[in-house]
Amino acid sequence: MLRRFGIVTALLATFATFPAEAMQFSMLQGSNGQKIVLAQGEIVAGDAGKLVRALHRASVDKHGTRTVWLNSPGGSVIDAMNMADVINAVGVTTVVPARAMCASACASVVFVAGKYRTVEKGGQLMIHSCFDARNGQKMDQCDAVISQRAQANGLSGRAMMAFQEIAPGPQYGVLFNAADAACFGLTHAPGKAELGDNAPCIQQALHGKPKKKK
């Protein structure tokens, strides 16, 4: 686990579950006329196929990606992984808009699969461990797979594992606002390199101070 994890600004918070309804996919129009997918609700079986159909209707931006806004309490990890596979294949910018939360599998699987990733001011990510819905027990193998997938997407796999270890869901989660998400390298802007373990807050947790840029 990352040393001195308590010094960072991400918060270990009680996970306030909000009403979960099956995920709905709708189209929004951005200020520039771009057609955006809004995905909100609980992740359930069949959502990957719905996402494919929604993305066919979305506009391709100047960076070659389609945009998906996320507002979800999470849900089925397997179906979240299927959604992530679609996002990787198509090329998607994932966004948590203001006043929205992307929690659990939405954050640790779907959001991080984006080629580019944004948490807008007022939006939040919540990450916790996998757990067996029948008894609430932490599932270590599932956590390991999620960490490996995060690493493959350019994030820090060991940081993802640490987030899951210190927040054994479903009661607790590590909460990230826009600034926290950027500091841990959870977000990624066009034209910028993925930070992985070099993200400032990860370096601070590992060594007590940010790593100096060469």
Image (cartoon, helix red, strand yellow):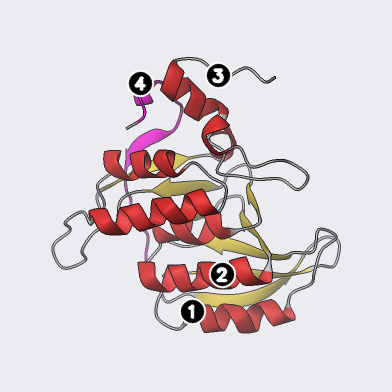
Distance from disc 2 to disc 1, alpha carbons, whole Å, reads: 10 Å
Disc 4 to disc 2: CB gap under 8 Å: no
Q: Residues within 10 Å of mark 2 (few under 14, many from 20)?
A: many
Which residues are the magenta region? 2-21
Read off the residue under disc 4: 4
Q: Residues within 10 Å of mark 3 (few under 14, many from 20)?
A: some
Disc 1 to disc 4: CB gap under 8 Å: no
Distance from disc 3 to disc 1, alpha carbons, whole Å, reads: 39 Å
Residue closest to the eye, 23 or 164? 164
What element does badge 1 sit on? helix
Read off the residue under disc 3: 210
Distance from disc 1 to disc 4, alpha carbons, whole Å, reads: 38 Å
- Does 15 sit left or right of 30 as displayed? left
For the residue marked with disc 2, what is the amino acid?
Ala
Q: Main secondary structure of the magenta part?
A: loop
Residue at 20% x, 63% y: name it: 132
In the rendered image, residue 14 lying in the magenta stretch gets the answer yes
What element does badge 4 sit on? loop
Counting from the top left corner in percent of width and height, residue 21 is at: 40, 73
Disc 2 to disc 1: CB gap under 8 Å: yes
* In the image, residue 167 above or below residue 32: above
What element does badge 3 sit on? loop
> Of callouts 3 and 1, which one flags the residue occurring earlier in the amino acid sequence?
1
What element does badge 2 sit on? strand
Read off the residue under disc 2: 39
> Of callouts 4 and 2, which one flags the residue occurring earlier in the amino acid sequence?
4
Distance from disc 4 to disc 3, alpha carbons, whole Å, reads: 13 Å
